Image: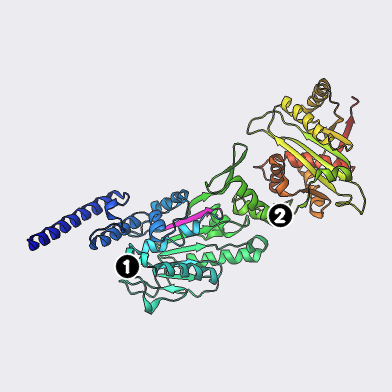
Amino acid sequence: MPGLLNCSYKLDCSIRNLFCRFQIKNSMIANKHLPAVLSPNSRIDPNSARFYYTLVRGQCQNSLWVHTQKGMGYTFIDPCMKDLCDWVQSKWNPRKPKRVNMLIYVSRDSFKSTSITQSLPSWALSQNPDLAILTASKTDTNATNFIRVQKNRYEDKEFIKIFGRWENRKAWGESSITIKGRKSWRKEASEQGAGIGTELTSTHWDVIIADDITTKKDMYSKAEREASKKFLQSLYDLADKRKCLIIVIGTCWHADDALENIRKQNPIKIKKGLMPFEIYERAAEIWKNGRWEIQFPFFTRQILDQIRADKADIRDYAANYRLKPRADESQVFTKFHYFDCDMDILKLTLEYIIIFVDPSLKDTAKNDFSAIVAVGKQKIDTNIQYSGRMLCLDADLKRRKPTETISAMVAFYLKMKALGVPIDMYMETNFFQEYMKDEAINQSIQQGVYLPLAGVDQKINKVMRITGMEKYSTSGQLLFRKKSQQGEGYREMMDQFENFPLKDYHDDGPDACQGAVDVITAGSNMSIDIIEV
């Protein structure tokens, strides 16, 4: 009887294992989730654990995204990055490698390097252990760190359970490793890290990943930009001409850096005769429908505003998070000075306030903003803070109809009037705006408000006028609110300052601010027509 029970138990285990194998085969084909019966924590026959990890290995090999999550253990990466992994996988197959050039042009703090640079090598080697993969960066330290992180994962028990032991003690160095299981005899390692200056002569690679080839130094130094381009071009010479995958991954710093030249598909500055790049581009926020729209679910407006506030150079944010690098010669406003906007104190120290209005005709997304800006002039007194400075107190920028603009002007004026400081108000009256000035006076009277409004006919080109204000901003004669104290309209104005004079951006806020500054500095750029109310 005991023997019969033992045979029955063995038969039951065999049937269960066959069932597990059937589940595994179907799941691997369909690439579905793991069946519950194969959970590693369940009480099943010990052999079934191997089936479980066989299934996991199959899922990892079938999907770069699954490998990133389960193979490399990067479960913290947001699912939105699956789109990037799927895009790379759709262009290149490690089992049948072919010649492909890719540019992954994604904003910072998005885990693009974790998803690709750290995960793709092991994903490719798990399917084709004879590949030779070069990971390059601008510095040897950064390149070595990429290899070190991957080595640590390969030595992890969970990785070994899925893919087996890769560690090869004879070739397991700091910046170069060769995995067990390689069948071909070749001098190139399975993975190697390299920075500028690393000797790589006479080597030929199946995969080259160039991550962070450009750095912040490229923003300020032409020599650094040329060094990055030269290094990147040297990597192209190391590629297997028949089947090499080249991935350039990073964010831009300058309008003429190595990544921007690839983005523009400039064959002369990339390398003559090199096949074009497939480009994957995704910024943290893009200008769409007249406003900045966030493109990643893990970024919020508050987070991006804080990142922007922490940047010492305003070009950093535009390049790294909007993928809008600027050339030095095109950047007009590169430095701002700020003040603490405590109205209870400022109302005692301000000499007067100038409000300037630049109205718009329509409220559609393609039209200009209606801009109302207040600039105050501080008294000259060594005992007060910001003595003699011009302070940009507030800004209201919004797309509005003319009637809405008039209502906003009245509300803005009453807000400033509450400070008890003398106020003058001006409106640009070029073209249709002359009518708006007269209408604003008439409508405000009906509301019992008497706007001290004068019309201004601007005579000098707008770009020249706004550019002329740069000297006040850079020298600290014109101060702006601290970033933490800026409202939505104020932030829009500052954004326009930072991107001036790019054609893709509006400049209504800087234009209105310049009008107020010009009145304070008694400029001769305008003809003021004082209207008696």
**Mark in the foreground, 2 or 1:** 1
Q: Specify the amino acid type for callout 1.
A: Gly
Q: In this view, does 463 lie to the left or right of 269?
A: right
Q: What residue is rendered at 88% in x and 38% in y?
A: 421
The answer to whether one can see residue 294 in this image is yes
Residue 50 falls in image quadrant: bottom left
Q: What residue is rendered at 47% in x and 70% in y?
A: 148
**N-terminal of the two: label 2 or label 1?**
1
Q: Specify the amino acid type for callout 2.
A: Glu
Quarter holding the N terminus is: bottom left
Q: Does the magenta stretch include residue 104?
A: yes
Q: What residue is rendered at 82% in x and 49% in y?
A: 478
**Picture coordinates of residue 209 (x, y %)?**
47, 63
Q: How crowded is mark 2: few (under 14 residues within 10 Å), some or many (20 or more)?
A: few
**Residue bearing the label numbered 1:** 164
Query: What count of labels does the image hold?
Result: 2
Q: Is residue 14 left or right of residue 188?
A: left
Q: What residue is rendered at 26% in x and 58% in y?
A: 43
Quarter holding the C terminus is: top right
Mark 1, secondary structure of its residue: loop
Tell me how far mark 2 sits from mark 1, CA to CA. 55 Å
Q: How crowded is mark 1: few (under 14 residues within 10 Å), some or many (20 or more)?
A: some
**Picture coordinates of residue 251 (x, y %)?**
56, 56
Span highlighted in magenta in the image: 100-107
> By what rule are the colours in the image chosen?
rainbow
Q: Is residue 289 magenta?
A: no
Mark 2, secondary structure of its residue: helix
The answer to whether one can see residue 523 in this image is no
**Residue bearing the label numbered 2:** 329
**Picture coordinates of residue 393 (x, y %)?**
79, 43
